Image (cartoon, rainbow, N blue to C red):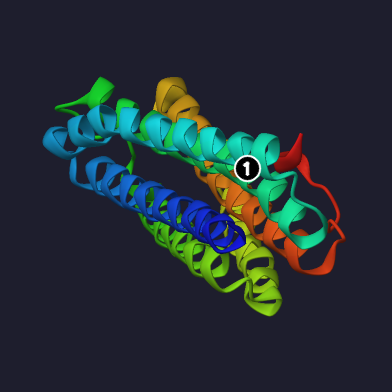
């Protein structure tokens, strides 16, 4: 009976890790759609978002069943509670990739991004996808140091996000208000995606140590 219980816990972690890869792939495709003005990729991200929603529902169902039927304690209880919160963060990451894809579709066949910020978004997309893939490994390994690395790597996205404001507020910005709004919103989507990856990493630290690292806006 206990062996089956631990198999279920492992399966829950595997499902969470799979979700992390799903949202990494979604943001990778959404970024390509944005940069390459690729409507097909944008549509793929939009249609695949339902799979992320289904994965969250499945993770939560597993977690609540374990709480109800197995009454886990100590580390096992932390694992189940962390899974519920992590699944929520991962689902939100999928939604943020969806928002990027919808922006690419909305402006098609015109590009969303002025040339002046394309490099910034390419880098933000690269780092955001890397963070989601790192989260997948942390979910599997419960490696506290690797989880802390995600938080430090997130700083790069924050710096690019801040830089975007200086670009659109510069007197030389000549791309109009609509482009400035697009850049502002898209920058926020990437910043929040990275923040949620940090939140997932913090949940894994909680599983191992029993202590929740300091909260940020992604936990609210």
Nearest the viewer among 77 and 102 is 77
Mark 1 neighbour density, 10 Å: few (under 14) some (14–19) many (20 or more): some
Say which residue appears at 70% left-offset and 74% top-offset.
144
Asked if residue 63 is positioned above or below residue 142 in the image, the reply reads above
Q: Where is residue 146 in the image (x, y as percent from the top left)?
A: 62, 76
Q: Where is residue 188 in the image (x, y as percent from the top left)?
A: 56, 37
**Can residue 186 be seen?**
no
Nearest the viewer among 115 and 92 is 92
Nearest the viewer among 20 and 177 is 20
User: On the rendered image, what quadrant is the N terminus found in?
Assistant: bottom right
SS at mark 1? helix
Nearest the viewer among 214 and 70 is 70
The answer to which quarter of the image holds residue 130 is: bottom left
Say which residue appears at 70% left-offset and 71% top-offset.
148
* Left or right position of 126 against 88: left
Asked if residue 85 is positioned above or below residue 76 in the image, the reply reads above
* Left or right position of 163 against 20: right
**Can residue 98 be seen?**
yes
Q: Name the residue under label 1.
A: 66
* Left or right position of 55 against 3: left
Tally of numbered discs? 1
Say which residue appears at 63% left-offset and 40% top-offset.
84
Asked if residue 77 is positioned above or below residue 61 in the image, the reply reads below
Q: Position of residue 101 (x, y in %)?
A: 31, 33
């Amino acid at each position: 009976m206990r062996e089956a219980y631990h198999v279920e816990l492992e399966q829950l972690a595997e499902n969470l890790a799979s979700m992390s890869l799903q949202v990494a792939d979604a943001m990778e495709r959404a970024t390509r759609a944005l940069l390459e003005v690729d409507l097909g990729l944008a549509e793929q991200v939009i249609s695949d978002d339902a799979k992320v929603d289904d994965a969250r529902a499945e993770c939560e169902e597993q977690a609540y069943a374990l709480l109800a039927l197995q009454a886990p304690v100590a580390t096992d209880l932390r694992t189940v509670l962390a899974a519920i919160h992590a699944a929520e963060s991962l689902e939100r990451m999928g939604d943020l990739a969806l928002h990027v894809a919808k922006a690419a579709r909305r402006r098609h066949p015109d590009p969303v991004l002025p040339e002046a910020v394309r490099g910034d978004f390419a880098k933000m997309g690269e780092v955001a996808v890397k963070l989601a893939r790192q989260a997948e490994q942390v979910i599997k390994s419960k490696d506290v140091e690797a989880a802390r690395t995600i938080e430090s790597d997130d700083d790069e996205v924050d710096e690019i996000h801040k830089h975007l404001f200086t670009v659109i507020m510069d007197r030389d910005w000549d791309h109009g208000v609509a482009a400035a709004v697009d850049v502002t919103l898209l920058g926020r989507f990437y910043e929040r995606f990275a923040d949620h990856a940090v939140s997932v990493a913090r949940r894994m630290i909680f599983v191992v140590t029993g202590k929740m690292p300091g909260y940020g806006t992604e936990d609210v």
